[in-house]
Image (cartoon, grey):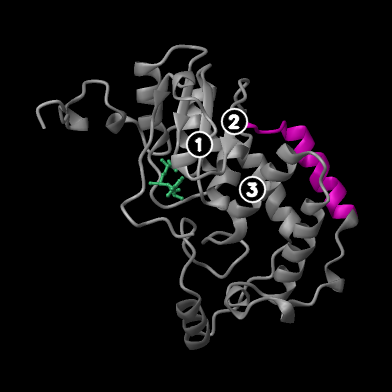
Amino acid sequence: MGRYRYILSYGIRDSWKYARDGWGIALHRICSRTGSFPPSLAHYFVMKYSRIGDVVLDPFSGKGTAPLEACLNGRIGVGNDLSPEAYVLTRAKVRPVPKRRVLEWIDYAERRLDPSSYEVSEVDDDVRAFYSNYTLRQILAVRDLIDEIDDEDLAIFIKAMMLGILHGPTKIHLSVRCSHSFSMAPGYVKRYVKENGVKKPKRDVLKCLRIKAERVFKDGIPSVKGFAYMNDARSLPIEDESVDLVVTSPPYFNMQTL
Ligand SMILES: C[S@@+](CC[C@H](N)C(=O)[O-])C[C@H]1O[C@@H](n2cnc3c(N)ncnc32)[C@H](O)[C@@H]1O
């Protein structure tokens, strides 16, 4: 125990705890996810313990908060997460595409989208619990259009934006009103919808995506690009010596859900 010193965060003069709510560029908020640390915390450690050009790694990067703060501050942010959804969010943050390309793709998708040929009866009942058939058909059509994208960074970025609107409480969220940071239990949602006569919203998916894009790019994107991996942290394809700083919050024991 003697080797470690525990410090209370409020005791640090320039602590991240004093940052205002919502601190950090809008790209951080592309999608909510439980268990994330605030951007101000990542910023604090990146600035304090690394220099410009350093490699900053988060082996359990979740939604990519630490790698994004690293890239924003001239470091090379590297993120890794075993969860495919976390990988998409991390990669969107360390390899974002310009706003123009996203808007061009949405224009293209609006011309191509044909939800009428999609059958929602093939979708798992637990997924249908969240969406009106009208919205779900569009989600399926958008998914197929994303699959056609050649540029992987663009495809990942659009996926990350879709993850950000798939469920939540506002008018740009596609599901019945629910939490935006975790997916609620389908059984609960089914019961709630039935007992309270809740109408599943009919959304124009690409319109919601366009609004999301306007918000996400509000404060720009980092000029430095980083890297994202989807590996078990115990077998990362990275040499120890190539990393200058690790900023991370590991999972609780036995908490990997894959
Ligand atoms: C507490 S969260 C990290 C949150 C992150 N700091 C953020 O701001 O979003 C821990 C992450 O570890 C990931 N994880 C769990 N076991 C893992 C493993 N063996 N290898 C890589 N990632 C793992 C989970 O998917 C989860 O995203």
Query: Which residue position holds label 1?
Result: 236
Q: Amino acid at mark 3?
A: Met
Query: Which residue position holds label 3?
Result: 161
Residue 178 sits above or below residue 59 on the image: below
Q: CA distance from mark 1 to mark 2?
A: 12 Å
Q: CA distance from mark 3 to mark 1?
A: 26 Å
Residue 30 place in picture, x, y as percent: 57, 44
Q: Is residue 189 magenta?
A: no
Residue 145 place in picture, x, y as percent: 81, 55
Tag 2 secondary structure: strand
Query: Which residue position holds label 2?
Result: 227
* Residue numbers of the magenta segment: 95-111
Q: Residues within 10 Å of mark 1 (few under 14, many from 20)?
A: some
Q: Main secondary structure of the magenta part?
A: helix
Any part of residue 60 in sight: no
Residue found 62% across the figure and 28% down from its top:
220
**In the drawing, does residue 233 fall left or right of residue 107?**
left
Q: Earlier in the sequence, mark 1 or mark 2?
A: 2
Residue 108 place in picture, x, y as percent: 87, 47
Q: Is residue 107 magenta?
A: yes
Q: CA distance from mark 2 to mark 3?
A: 19 Å
Q: Earlier in the sequence, mark 3 or mark 1?
A: 3
Residue sitting at the far top: 52
Name the image quarter holding residue 228: top right
Instruction: Choose between 23 and 231: the one closer to the eye.
Output: 231
Q: Amino acid at mark 1?
A: Leu
